[in-house]
Image: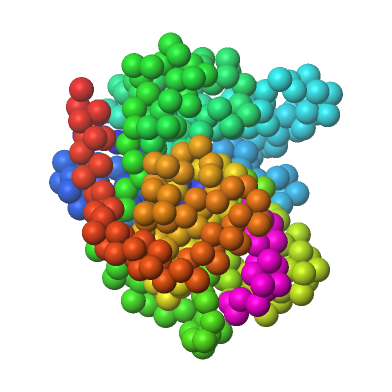
Amino acid sequence: MKLLVVMHGIDGGGAEKSLISFLTTLDRKYGDDIDVDLLIFRPEGLFLNQIPKSCNRLTEPKEVFTMSYSPFERMFWSNMSLNGIIGKMRHYISRIKKSDSYLSNIQAMWSHWKPYIPSVKKHYDVAISYMHGATNYFVIDKCNADKKYLYIHHEYEKMNENAQFDYSYFKQANAVITVSARCVQSVINVHPKLKDKVVCIENIHSETLIRKMAEGSTTHTFNNKNNCIKIVSIGRLTDVKRFDRAVEAAKILKDNGINFIWILIGSGELENNLKELIKQFGLEKEFILAGVKANPYPYIKNADIFVQTSDNEGKSMVIDEAKILGKPIVVTNYMTVRDVIKDGEDGMIADFTPESVAEKIMMIIEDKSLRDRIISNLKSETIGNENEIEKYISLWRK
């Protein structure tokens, strides 16, 4: 089988981590039967060197490369494309004029860039977009494959996409893959005609690999904090992750006399905002922005509590990773949370307020029987799911 996988980028994130697990598991189980080509729009990032060597990385078309950067960010790169820049300028002008304001930003970008992006000439048995947005549109419009599969990693109802625009693509796919039963239902709620086309395949994670990687080291600061509660959060520093809520919860913990250090692993456009908030609350010693880590698992392993404060998630990979490492979890009550956490059994579900997040953290700290029960329940769970790869194989062979 000849397989093409298309991804927007490979920097640190749940979908990117899921892609690496998918490619690694596919290579280990079906490497002799499936030839994999990988096209990455923005070929840089944390996980680039973790791509299996058996994957053939295609050189991204200059027009796609240009699409993935601002014209000022990479203006002098030799592989920028004039056609790509023209498409980008058309998009910027249309946004200023608001002539396509009914579309999301990425939908509008694609509608302007599509004429300038060349098609993939090679024929494939299967082409799969591993991310929503431009990669979905690229697979339908620009790939030559017998079967095409699209992806949605989040609750579709909360993605603010133009449903009619997306439907024109979804209906052409052999299937639309998403990561949880609730995410499936979210797509169907918007697109009931797709009810027989939307399938659930969970993000793949290997217990063996995660436990092995967790034996690595953390920073000196974290290792030396033996007399306080160690809290870890991981994610992109973006609006939807709501790490401002985490910082505000940390302020409440400090006001209540809790001795703790909270490590936030990740990067993003809100880093400076968070730094200001940390400074405003006088949390420079307690709340640490640690940046992106190629191996975050030692931090989770050495933590006492893992906290996620998002407004919205698909099926969070990092929650399952924290569960594999046996850590009590505090998570906010987004729509899909009960796909991964049983409240009071293997974690605690908080409301969308800093006060509730802080309250749940303090419950775990102060109630030893609750903490012990959660840890015991986590030890009895089977969380690794490498067999999810068989769902892909079954789908492709239909």
Snapshot colouring: rainbow
Which residue is at a point 29% across and 64% down the rendered structure image? 376
Position in image of residue 225 (x %, y %): 53, 85
Q: Residue furthest left?
A: 32
Dividing the image into 4 quarters, which one contains the C terminus?
top left
* Vertical arrangement, residue 151 with respect to residue 73, above or below: above
Is residue 57 depicted above or below 4 in this figure? below
Nearest the viewer among 295 and 288 is 288
| Residue found at x 71% / y 52% | 73
Please check the rendered image and state whether residue 246 is part of the magenta-colored stretch, yes or no: yes
Indicate the position of residue 156 as horizontal and vertical percent values. 52, 29
| Residue 48: quadrant of the picture | bottom left
Image quadrant where residue 84 sits: top right
Question: Which residue reaches farthest right?
Answer: 97
User: Is residue 394 in view from this perspective?
Assistant: yes
**Residue shown at 41% from the left, 28% from the top:** 184
Is 103 one of the magenta-colored residues? no
Along the line of sight, the residue nearer the viewer: 288 or 306: 306
Give the extent of the magenta segment. Answer: 242-260
Say which quadrant the N terminus sits in: top left
The answer to whether residue 297 of the structure is visible from this angle is no
